[in-house]
Image (cartoon, rainbow, N blue to C red):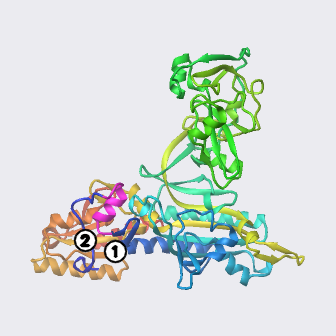
Amino acid sequence: MRASQILVPTLRETPAEAEVISHKLLLRAGFIRKAAAGVYTYLPLAQRVLKKIQQIIREEMDREGGQEILLPVIQPAELWQESGRWDVYGPELFRLKDRHGRDFALGPTHEEIITFLVKGEVSSYKQLPLLLYQIQNKYRDERRPRFGVLRGREFIMKDLYSFDKDEEGLDVSYRKMYEAYARIFKRCGLKFRPVEADSGAIGGSDTHEFMVLADAGEATVLYCEKDNCDYAANAEKAKAMEPIKTNFEEVLALEEVYTPGRQTITQVAEYLGITANKLIKTLFYETEDQLVAVLVRGDHDVNEIKLQHLLDCLRLELAGEKTVQEFTGAPVGYVGPVGLQGIKIIADSEVAVMSNAVAGANKPDYHYKNVNPGRDFSLNQIADIRIVQAGEPCPSCGAPLCEARGIEVGQVFKLGDKYSKAMGATFQDENGKSRPYIMGCYGIGVSRTMAAAIEQNHDSNGIVWPVSIAPFHLVIVPVNTKDINLVKLSERLYLEYINEGIEVVLDDRHERPGVKFKDADLIGYPLRLTIGKKALEEGNFELYIRKTGETSFMKEEQLKIFIKDYIKREQNI
């Protein structure tokens, strides 16, 4: 391709809207342009990158027996109503009506419609297992689209759905996809970690997210510091090690103490001369059908995802100050578990082993000292309901946990019979018995993977693309387009390299060499071949490697061999 013919509107200044590196560089390097909040046009270079990522995905899905299909973007509401998600998915679901007043949704995901398809076409266990996938635009009405294509309202996604006759078959399908995802992200040149995760609105049981480690990541990843331990989880899912009671101090008498104006954990701890881990924090949560009291240690925070799963509720909200005061008779900051009646009390596992703790007395300006669970109040349920932090012991081996930021680029889910049972999607087993399909779903954010690659591969001059997903492998830069001999040499090499299967751009623009070099670095071509006087007069060609910053001079016969070997090696072929 000739640079003069490609639509690559590079920018010298970073648009004010761009927050993270990938957003800035995709805009500056002429890969994307904004159409609306969270909605972008992909220009030619971006489309080349996306097609390469998609090709890698297709190869790995097909290798595992996946069959590509294409499902409709517009989905009838009755399918979502059948699964129960129409009312619970939330405002992220784009909803619309046709001219007849019928309800539809723009697909954020396709569990319902793929289940509907298979329900009508697959009736026997002999047709299973089945792996069906598509690569398609998805739509979610994000409350706050941000970070360019990392969190948009329209995005490109690969989603595969597995249908098996039993849980053992699902385990096989899940492992296939898990391993395929690892190969995909490795081939895309990404540093990543599979982590235990929460299934969210998709539902189901086991799930793993594939996280690209990068400062721009919105998720917190906790992982074991030991090289031979593979435990990793996002902060929503990370497990706390089961606490062991080690403090067997003498149990003291309950004592009411005056704590005027001390409502926060820090204020109470300082006033009483104790540390935050000696306090019990009491919070009240409302679900769709009950009010519950939740207890965590003063230096810990409630993990609302864990709590919601424990309560098996659709809605979970922190109760307002008015509700708390009406129920306890005390303002927020002075409430505690002692004397609470008519409410379910749920405690984090750490609270259950505390001795002589401090908690609110359900009385303005007062707290209790020497509060002991079991003696002073009863617990309805004890569970791991807190956020785990870096430095805590790994639940697998006990070594300290480390923390990093991650960008979720893929997720694999075990759905079980969540959708098939709700939608009456069944098959006949070996004994002629009707049974629901056992399903899994597996997603990769294609456009997000492109952005994540930039977050990991860039420098102060621009993008540093991994060769496997770079828009082109090589750019040829003649330093003087007015020199006919330089132009002829550049043209000859350009055509030869195309015939050799090398993806090459000839920068034939009538621009200064410095402008061309800056654009080449900004766009991120892995290799840059400069055609100048040395090439003409001495036969020495200057080749610059973007990844390392190295510049080498070599003869023409060496040049082609080096370029082809470099591309092959970097693509891990």
Tell me which segment is drawn in magenta.
Answer: 17-31
Quarter of the image that includes the N terminus: bottom left
What type is the residue that disc 1 sits on? Leu
The amino acid on which the numbered mark 2 sits, given as a three-letter code, is: Pro
Quadrant of res 368 = top right
Q: How many marks?
A: 2
Residue 519, x across and y down, in percent: 23, 65
- The residue at which mark 2 appears reads as 9
Residue furthest right as drawn:
431
Give the mark, 2 or 1, whose residue is nearer the N terminus: 2
**Residue 378 position in % (x across, y down):** 77, 31
Residue 82 quadrant: bottom right
State the image quarter where residue 438 is shown.
bottom right
Is the residue 234 above or below the residue 370 in the image?
below
Q: Could you tell me if the residues under marks 2 and 1 are in contact, i.e. CB atoms within 8 Å?
A: yes
The residue shown at (62%, 68%) is 86
Q: Residues within 10 Å of mark 1 (few under 14, many from 20)?
A: some
Name which residue lies at 77% across and 64% down: 167
Q: Look at the image and say whether residue 21 sits in the magenta stretch.
A: yes
Give left or right: position of 459 versus 251.
left
Task: Determine crowd level at label 2: few under 14, some 14-19, many 20+ residues with C-alpha closer than 10 A.
Answer: few
Callout 2: SS: loop
Find residue 91 and report its horizontal and vertical position in percent. Answer: 53, 63
Specify whether residue 230 is in view: no
Which residue is identified by label 1? 43
